[in-house]
Image (cartoon, helix red, strand yellow):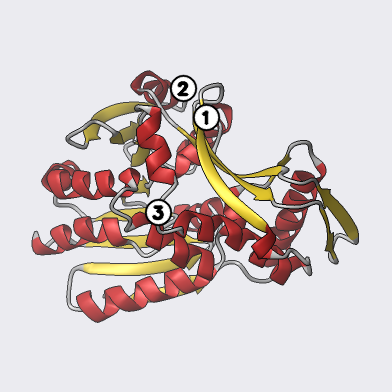
């Protein structure tokens, strides 16, 4: 079976992506308070650091999802049936959790295509190479796409139809506010056909002490991840951030129902960004938000599904009900 890598982030698509990056930085640093979206962090190294986060024992979203996949792999297999299907993963990264499912499908002698999509070219290249080295004689074919989510989905939708199941894992949807999440799932539904499935990971609301512990690890990897944003801005935009002059902390905000991470300037300073031809002032201990991780209730999840034209097939919980992988079917 073929194992293929394609880079859709080239030419005009690459230019558009670069323009979006520049605009996000300009808008975020010009606002009060300063706020930059976490997707800016995910170059190849940023993706590698985030993989380290998912392996932390205290980072419950990843650990819960690994548990769910091991517990319910047979349930998911039964849902998809014996006919050929396609697994599309948005933001695949290293594909660690998904490999539990892929291996189970292969052990059951199923024929299917796996399409991991990620903005990190390095992550997708590595994942395709790893899968080819381990599963080249199986019934799985792989098409890895370095692409924005909906650019990748648009290319797939133009191909011959088989039933799709789209995986959007790791509580990535929590990086959006609730209105933005609704827009996202509606756009996702419009990229699919009636009968397709969607499986989305949602981190559920739980005691704030547990949330604080999950996002403030003693090893400093969360800080390493957030401060990597400054390296990205220096490299891509010609900024002169001095990383040692900033620190990071995450905290639960009861007003927004989200864990919010901030990096704090430890002194008054002025940063220049050459590409923008602008300078930006930071006050002593001024905070700049770099992450937003919304915590869901089941009622909110069911509202998202119903409003986007899907029905809930099942909720798959970990043993402590800290996290859920919700499976939906497109019905209209």
The label on residue 182 is 1
Q: How far apart in space, not on screen, are marks 3 and 2 (Cα)?
A: 40 Å
In this view, the residue farthest toward the left is 108
Q: Quadrant of residue 13?
A: bottom right
Q: Is residue 89 visible?
A: yes
Number of residues whose C-alpha sits closer than 10 Å to that of mark 1, classed few (under 14), some (14–19) or many (20 or more) = some
Q: Sequence order check: which comes first, mark 3 or mark 2?
A: 3
Looking at the rendered image, the disc whose residue lies closer to the viewer, 2 or 1, is: 1
Quarter of the picture containing the C terminus is top left
Q: How far apart in space, not on screen, are marks 2 and 1 (Cα)?
A: 8 Å
Task: Answer whether labels 2 and 1 touch (C-beta < 8 Å).
Answer: yes
- Above or below for 14 versus 328: below
Task: Give the image location of residue 62, x and y in percent.
Answer: 32, 49
- Above or below for 194 versus 71: above
The foreground one among 2 and 180 is: 180
Please give left or right for residue 217 compared with residue 232 in the image.
left
Reading the image, the residue beneath label 3 is 218
Quarter of the picture containing the N terminus is bottom left
Residue at coordinates 15% horizontally, 50% vertically from top-left? 70
Residue at coordinates 65% horizontally, 67% vertically from top-left? 231
- Above or below for 16 versus 314: below
Reading the image, the residue beneath label 2 is 307
Residue at coordinates 57% horizontally, 50% vertically from top-left? 248
Q: Is residue 81 visible?
A: no
Looking at the rendered image, the disc whose residue lies closer to the viewer, 3 or 2, is: 3
Please give left or right for residue 307 compared with residue 297 in the image.
right
Residue at coordinates 51% horizontally, 36% vertically from top-left? 251
Task: Answer whether labels 3 and 2 touch (C-beta < 8 Å).
Answer: no
Number of residues whose C-alpha sits closer than 10 Å to that of mark 2, classed few (under 14), some (14–19) or many (20 or more) = few
């Amino acid at each position: 079976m073929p194992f293929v890598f394609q880079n859709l982030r080239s030419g005009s698509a690459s230019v558009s992506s670069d323009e979006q990056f520049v605009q996000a930085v300009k808008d975020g640093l010009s606002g009060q308070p300063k706020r930059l979206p976490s997707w800016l962090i995910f170059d190849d190294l940023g993706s590698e650091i985030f993989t380290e986060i998912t392996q932390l024992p205290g980072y419950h979203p990843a650990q819960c999802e690994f548990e769910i996949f091991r517990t319910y792999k047979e349930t998911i297999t039964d849902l998809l049936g014996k006919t050929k299907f396609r697994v599309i993963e948005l933001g695949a990264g290293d594909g660690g959790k998904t490999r539990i499912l892929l291996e189970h499908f292969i052990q059951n002698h199923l024929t299917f295509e796996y399409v991991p999509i990620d903005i990190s070219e390095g992550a997708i290249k590595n994942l395709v190479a790893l899968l080819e080295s381990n599963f080249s004689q199986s019934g799985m074919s792989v098409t890895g796409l370095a692409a924005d989510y909906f650019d990748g989905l648009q290319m797939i939708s133009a191909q011959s139809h088989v039933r799709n199941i789209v995986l959007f894992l790791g509580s990535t949807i929590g990086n959006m506010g609730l209105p933005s999440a609704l827009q996202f799932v509606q756009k996702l539904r419009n990229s699919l056909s009636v009968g397709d499935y969607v499986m989305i990971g949602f981190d559920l609301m739980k005691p704030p002490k547990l949330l604080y512990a999950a996002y403030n690890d003693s090893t400093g990897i969360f800080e390493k991840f957030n401060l990597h944003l400054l390296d990205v801005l220096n490299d891509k935009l010609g900024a002169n951030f001095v990383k040692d002059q900033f620190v990071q902390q995450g905290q639960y905000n009861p007003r927004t129902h989200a864990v919010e991470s901030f990096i704090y300037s430890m002194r008054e300073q002025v940063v220049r960004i050459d590409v923008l031809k602008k300078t930006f002032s930071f006050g002593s201990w001024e905070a700049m938000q770099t992450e937003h991780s919304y915590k869901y209730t089941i009622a909110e999840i069911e509202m998202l599904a119903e409003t986007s034209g899907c029905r809930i097939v099942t909720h798959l919980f970990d043993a402590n009900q800290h996290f859920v992988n919700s499976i939906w079917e497109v019905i209209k």
